[in-house]
Image (cartoon, helix red, strand yellow):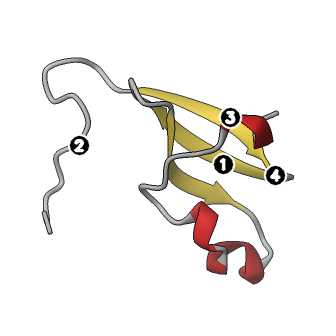
């Protein structure tokens, strides 16, 4: 496990962040070569933060991105 304030993805290139609506929930995602990775959830519903597919660092499924 890595504990650091430095971004894990692409230290030599700038990180591109995108705000998306994923499965009805607004999130902030980091664009990587593999796809979008969850960075932050924008929600007032506490149950959204307990969803396994929305944990920070999770690779998102393209079919659910709007």
Question: In front: mark 1 or mark 3?
Answer: 3
Residue that carries the numbered disc 2 in the rendered image:
7
Question: Which of pointers 1 and 2 lies earlier in the amino acid sequence?
Answer: 2
Contact between marks 1 and 2 (CB within 8 A): the answer is no
Please give the label number shown on residue 62. 3
Question: Which of pointers 2 and 3 lies earlier in the amino acid sequence?
Answer: 2
Q: Is residue 43 above or below residue 15?
A: below
Contact between marks 1 and 3 (CB within 8 A): the answer is no
Please give the label number shown on residue 27. 1
Residue that carries the numbered disc 4 in the rendered image:
23
Question: Which of pointers 3 and 4 lies earlier in the amino acid sequence?
Answer: 4
Q: Position of residue 1 (x, y in %)?
A: 14, 69
Q: Is residue 7 left or right of residue 62?
A: left
Question: In front: mark 3 or mark 4?
Answer: 3
Q: Position of residue 48 (x, y in %)?
A: 73, 72
Q: Under tag 2, what secondary structure?
A: loop
Please give the label number shown on residue 2. none
Q: Which residue extends farthest right?
A: 24
Q: CA distance from mark 1 to mark 4?
A: 10 Å
Q: Position of residue 49 (x, y in %)?
A: 64, 75
Residue shown at 59%/45% (left/top)? 60
Q: Nearer the viewer, residue 33 or 9?
A: 33
Q: Is residue 45 left or right of residue 36?
A: right
Q: Is residue 55 above or below residue 33?
A: below
Q: Under tag 3, what secondary structure?
A: helix
Q: Position of residue 24 (x, y in %)?
A: 86, 52
């Amino acid at each position: 496990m890595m504990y650091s304030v430095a971004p894990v993805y692409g230290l030599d290139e700038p990180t591109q962040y995108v705000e998306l609506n994923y499965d009805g929930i607004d999130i902030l995602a980091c664009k990587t070569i593999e796809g979008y990775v969850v960075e932050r959830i924008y929600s007032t519903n506490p149950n959204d933060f307990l969803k396994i597919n929305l944990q920070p660092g999770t690779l998102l499924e393209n079919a659910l991105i709007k």
